[in-house]
Amino acid sequence: MPAREPAVLKSVLLDESIPRQVAQPLWEAGYEVSTVEQAGLKGLKNGELLRAAEGRFDVLLTADQSMHAQQNLRGRRIAIVALPTNRRSAVLDRAADIVDTIRAVAQGQHARVAGDGTRTVRDNDDPAGPHADLAPIKPFSFGGEEA
């Protein structure tokens, strides 16, 4: 995968699918966090949301695992981190791993976190091209069972 210029990603937009309670651990980790509602972007479809968020936010945190396949991400500078669930308890339980994933992704990349804990990062400009695997994390728990 081509190397991206290092940039400190500071602002995170929480998609409607993400529990708003995850804002607190992200804020504690030093991120500026807004929900789509706070940003005035509630109700926008994925393509519209990406266009509106581009340039205003560094990272979009979503539970939409297929956004990278449904949207043309070429040229997008916003980083996207897709979680395997929007279940509040599972997301809050994995807050430190979510912070770690955000720190590992660069502008123009999207990271997909699978329920089994695997994390894959791809370039927005070449989504079918080479990818990088981040160190796996503990699998997500979905109501007493792991993914």
Image (cartoon, helix red, strand yellow):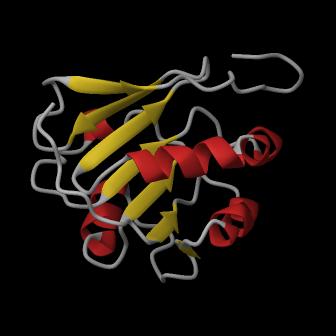
Quarter of the image where one finds residue 58? bottom left
Q: Residue at x 77, y 48 (%)?
A: 92
Q: Position of residue 17 (x, y in %)?
A: 59, 52
Say left or right for 4 vs 145: left
Q: Position of residue 126 (x, y in %)?
A: 11, 35
Locate the N terminus and report the quarter of the image it occupies.
Answer: top left
Q: Quadrant of residue 140?
A: top right
Is 60 rendered above or below residue 64? below
- Name the spot of residue 91 as percent of width and height, x first: 71, 44
Q: Is residue 50 left or right of residue 9?
A: left
Q: Is residue 139 above or below residue 56?
A: above
Front residue of 2/71: it is 2
- Left or right: 40 in relation to 22: left
Which is more toward the observer, 83 or 45?
Answer: 83
Going by the picture, which residue comes out furthest to the right? 144
Q: Please determine whether, in this image, residue 101 is positioned above or below residue 37.
A: above
- Where residue 18 sits: x, y (%)? 62, 54
